[in-house]
Amino acid sequence: MAHLRSGITVAPSQRCQNGSVLKWGRLVVAVAVLGGLGAVVPAALAVAATLSHPVVGVAATPDGKGYWEVASDGGVFALGDAPFEGSTGGDALQAPVVGMAATPDGNGYREVASDGGIFAFGNAAFEGSMGGRTLDAPVVGMAATPDGRGYWEVASDGGIFAFGNAAFEGSMGGRTLDAPVVGMAATPDGRGYWEVASDGGIFAFGDAAFEDSEGGQHLSAPVVGMAATPDGRGYWEVAADGGIFTFGDATFEGSMGGQHLSAPVVGMAITPHGQGYWEVASDGNSTAFGDAMALGSPPSVPPRVTLFGDSLAGEAGEDFSTLAQAAGASAFVRAFPGTAPCDWIPQMSADDAEFHPTDVVLLFDGGYFTQCMSGYAFGSPEYYAKYQTDIQAAIDLLRADGAHVFLVGLPYDESPTLSANAATLNQIYASVAAANAGVDYVDAGQSVMAYGSFTWTLPCLPGEPCTGPSGTDVVRAPDGVHFCPNGVSTQVDYFTECSVYSSGAFRFATAMLNPILKG
């Protein structure tokens, strides 16, 4: 990570000695205006550092008086009467952990990674895994047999892998799916199981009965998991916004649907009698409903944010880093003019393995000049399909480690042709975000437009230099695309540094960062 830069890594005096007066001036402005734009530091940032990676799954104890949360690094947090039996937290993993399942007596549990690897703790026995084998799609979850002597792994393409005394009863592997599978649940006798997809579709196998689903319905947020009733005659689906959907004899006991969440919900667990449940978010916060007991959540650490993008990301990158660090977060920027999502996917994988970001921002305004975009004519159906495919590939990579992904909406340009392209890409980004758990669309482009239209100037923000005519600041470059008001900039590592203060870059950076800092 030697090439990553973070905006404020040296003292003010050092900056002056280096002649970087403008950088220090920008830092003063950024901190002064931060509060006025609502970029406040969440209360969670003051809590002791324990949860260093996002939570990806949860399992309850047999008596319902406790539960475990598992993070993407394999760290386990035991709450209530759940005993801590060890974890892979702190170990070097070949792939992130994506879920867990407990033994029947609650004295052990297993973690499953996206490559199919299984890690067993306490009295949980290792019965084999898909670790080290070639998979058509990443593993997204698991379920254990009633006696704990076997388990299933489920992949995003619906493939099922059975180990120990777990019986294979069929799967969706090899079939065409409308949406990826995100989880599973087993029947009480272990002779069947359900798979659930992000669109709420349910697939039943063995003696698991289909009791209807949300498949084909309009959802406010994608489904991220499910749980079955103790008698196996019903099940719940839980969405990223905390919404709960009940089928069969599963009862609705309340939900976080429609409430403000500090982080997306990633899973649920039920109480022994099925009269209550917990929803757990990626920041470890849990909410109890019905007869489920409120048992607290593990403390967390400040966000670790990465920004990937092209020239717009490079111009806004220094303000983005400065604002993030002023709020107590850490931020890294990976940006270069003209690049597309496909240029950065290998680097995303490397950074994800080393940095483990909690949040990743993707900002691409339609570049098509690099080798990976060769043959995709600007504005063609193939061009837009390529962007959508590559953005989805980036999401699949980043979400596997539990990162929350933000797709940035683009500002319109002076050129009608470029504005039309931005509008189409924005539609793609918004639709992809809506179809994926833990992904949000951020319409940051509006921050440098006037009532949804291109503009050269906007009224000055409180506390910032007011350099334009009649109490305004110039927010776009002379080319009608970028942010540097005089059009004079220099490429320095991953930043495109403007020779004068850029209100457009500052506004755009703030709009991208605010959803992360607000939680």
Image: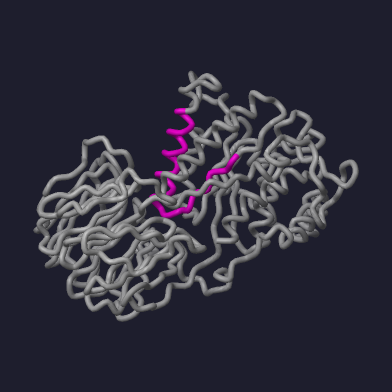
- Up/down of 151 relative to 483, above or below: below
Magenta highlight on residue 403: yes
List x then y, in percent, for residue 499.
80, 40
Magenta highlight on residue 172: no
Could you tell whether 239 is left or right of 360 in the image?
left
Could you tell whether 471 is left or right of 395 in the image?
right
Q: Residue at x 63, y 41 (%)?
A: 313
> Can you tell which quarter of the image residue 189 is in?
bottom left
Magenta span: helix, strand or loop, mainly?
helix
| Color scheme of the displayed model | one colour
- Up/down of 376 relative to 285, above or below: above
- Up/down of 42 relative to 489, above or below: below
Image label count: 0
Q: Residue at x 65, y 37 (%)?
A: 411
375 or 497, nearer to the observer: 375
Q: Residue at x 51, y 63 (%)?
A: 260
List x then y, in percent, for residue 172.
21, 42
> Can you tell which quarter of the image residue 502 is in?
top right
Q: Residue at x 44, y 52 (%)?
A: 438
List x then y, in percent, for residue 158.
24, 44
User: Can the viewer see residue 445 in this picture?
Assistant: yes
Q: Quadrant of the C terminus?
A: bottom right
Magenta span covers which residues?
385-409
User: Can the viewer see residue 346 in this picture?
Assistant: no
Could you tell whether 428 is left or right of 466 in the image?
left
371 or 228, nearer to the observer: 228
Could you tell whether 201 is left or right of 261 in the image?
left
List x then y, in percent, for residue 85.
28, 73
